[in-house]
Image (cartoon, helix red, strand yellow):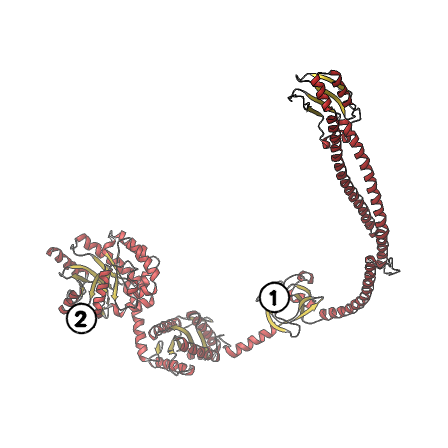
Amino acid sequence: MSLIHLRHRLAFRQAVAVVLISVVIGFCTKAVEIYLDLRHQQDSAAASIAQVVELHRDTAARAVYLLDRNMGREVTDALISHPAIYSAVVMDDFGDPLAASKRSPSQEIRSVFSGELVGYLLNFESHIEQPLRLEGVGYVEDHSSRLVIDIDTPFIASEVGKRAIDGLAIGLFNVLLLALTLLFLFYHYLSRPILRIARWVEQLGEGELGKLPYTQRDELGDLVNSIGHLWQERQEATDRLSESVAQLSRSEQFSRSLMENAGDAMFLCELDGTIVRLNHQAADSLGYAQGALLGSNLAKFSEIRSQSEYQSLFDSMDSREAVTFEDRQRRAKGDLFPIEARGIRLEQQEQQYVLIIARDITLRKEAEMRIHELAFFDTLTRLPNRRLFTDRLNSAIELHRAKGNLGAVLYMDLDRFKTINDSLGHTVGDQLLCAIASRVRHTLPNEATCSRFGGDEFVMLVPEIDNTRESCAEAAANLASELVQQMQIPFEIDGHVLYCSASVGISLFPHSGADQMDVLRQADTALYRVKAMGRNGFQFYDPEMQTTAQQRLQVEKGLHQALDNDELELWYQPQYNSREQMIGAEVLIRWNHPERGMVLPGEFIQVAEDSGQILDIGNWVLDRAFRQLCCWREQGLPETFQRLAVNISPMQFMQVDFVDRVTELLKLYQLPGSMLELEITENMLLNNFDVACQKMKLLKQKGVHFAIDDFGTGYSSLKYLRHLPLDVLKIDRSFVTGLRTDTEQAAIVQVIITTAERLNLVVIAEGVETVDEREALQQLGCFSFQGYLFARPISADLLTEKLTLEQTKA
């Protein structure tokens, strides 16, 4: 729709609005005026009728009093002569008509407005009855004699309606005349100038200012002047913009040409990484068409950075300094390639962008990697060389000194390599070295470093083993033994089956004041000691550590055979009360070594704990103990014999299936849980209190009893006593040996016994060997004993005889 048509529509709306508003306001004003006039007419008519009635009322009363019909008729004729009264009746004292006159009502046309509406608004009473009374003649008024008149309301309404219609017509005429006058004034002073201004604005759109259409100094004149000034400013700005666009077009063409012919990939991105422009080199490097990359995010092709990381990087850039970074991008075919990119922030048309210039640095990275490999890796075996190894060893030594951990260096030399290399040639020798390197890598743990120092020398760094020298030495010995065994496996090289052994020297670190060269020298010294002793083995730099590691290694290997060869045995040490009645027994393990004879648990239990073999040994002990208890129960036990105590390893107790295993054994051998007592250590409670407490409660539901072994030697026993389902406290032998009631040692025992009594726990003293120790314990309140004074650990057969003897005595 054109601007002229729009202005006509506004003028038409203005005219309609003025007319409607004038009519509504005039009509409402006239309606109020008519309503007030109606009220006034109502009051006037009522007053006129009342005046006529009052004028003839006494005469009518006299006529009733005298019963003079003629007089009454004169009254009624006089009343109906009033134009508003069409019926009048005088009633006597008996309620009968004395005189009556009536004429026809007014025959005026009753329109809705003049009749019904005006009559409704007037609300005029059409039937009036007035009582008659004659003053001063002794006449008593009653309700029978009265004057009855009927009012001609249509006549009154028609008169009032005519006045209302005439007033309304005159009012509407005045309103319309006013509206037309206003429309003329509006059109002359507003609409017509606006139409001329609209035509002038259309001419401005065609580029011509022309003569001003309105020059009066009012609001419209100010509007015309403002539009003229704005048009002139716009015209000047358009001229400047056209010149700028022309310059920008030339600059854009130059920039586009420069970007398209650049040798590097160029991306113009928004701050969130969205690509808005790129050159052919960028599309070719990614393997996509240019159109397919527009609108994509740069992070889509990155292997390293996400969209949020790119946005953080771009937000940190500014227009004063370029930022250099590296990335790995993925081509359309899926292969990755490294890039080096420079990014700088730009602003165009109040919009922030980042221009990225990227370059493929695959060749440079390959060269750097090659240089790194030549500098730090052996060219034949691809293992780290001496330089990289010594750097890592130095870092490990400094780290271990700070943390307190221990590591090991293993120096390995091949025993027969020179003979193989000289007889079969360097090609076979090189292939053998590569095969040995591969085998060593698979033998070592992931965190270890294996280096080739040259020739047939391989040095291995195990950076972090343990925080005790014994455990570290044992682990290093196991690893060295495994390496020696792996080297004894034949190698198949180029159709030849080659046999090669190895010698390994071991040095633990850190030592006080020893650097990486000292550690290597110690490992090399240990290596030459192996060669001097006949090769094909390993040695520690420290002879004492060598002996300890060898012994632990022999024990560990022997334990594997002990279970298979049934070399382990269960022995039992009885427990007695103060009346020397057997109340139970503790299960003890012995190793009947084929060469060393009977080995006590102190020599192999810790090794089994460290190697994990304690799980198999512990399960074996439980099964044999339950089986033996079942046999004794079937043969018959003394009434005083309460339960069999079995020591449980912390590692065994913390197994997920421990509770289920104990429950299954109780069912298998049909034993009540009350005959089983599990002895646990304080350290296990200290390290795994919540888990241990839960398992103890589950087994307690089966009737199983629990005892704290070696009570008083831990760190937090008293703290946990009240929270655990315990039954027995076993006083450690260190508190019992040489016990007398007048010593500080007795005070400690007294505290333990008193604490147990308050918690309703049984106390058993271990290691009771003299009568004085027993008497001192009884005086302090302990009445259960275990030790050499009563019985030494014995075999199952001897304990069976003792049980039989106890039952016979009973």
Residue at (21% x, 71% y) in the render: 745
In primary-sequence order, the first of circles 2 and 1 is 1
- What amino acid is at disc 1? Gln
Q: Which residue is mark 1?
A: 311
In the displayed structure, does residue 463 sit left or right of residue 190?
left
In the displayed structure, does residue 306 sit left or right of residue 670?
right
In the displayed structure, does residue 37 sit left or right of residue 611?
right
Q: Which mark is residue 739?
A: 2
Q: Secondary structure at mark 1?
A: helix
In the displayed structure, does residue 520 sit left or right of residue 576?
right
Specify the quadrant that holds the C terminus: bottom left
Q: Residue furthest left?
A: 809
Near mark 2 (Cα within 10 A), the count class, few <14, some 14-19 or many ≥20, is: many
Residue at (81% x, 40% y) in the render: 171
Count of marks overlaid on the render: 2
Rendered position, 77 above or below 692? above
Along the viewing direction, whichever of 623 and 108 lies nearer the viewer = 108
Q: Residue furthest right?
A: 211
Of badges 2 and 1, nearer the viewer stands 2
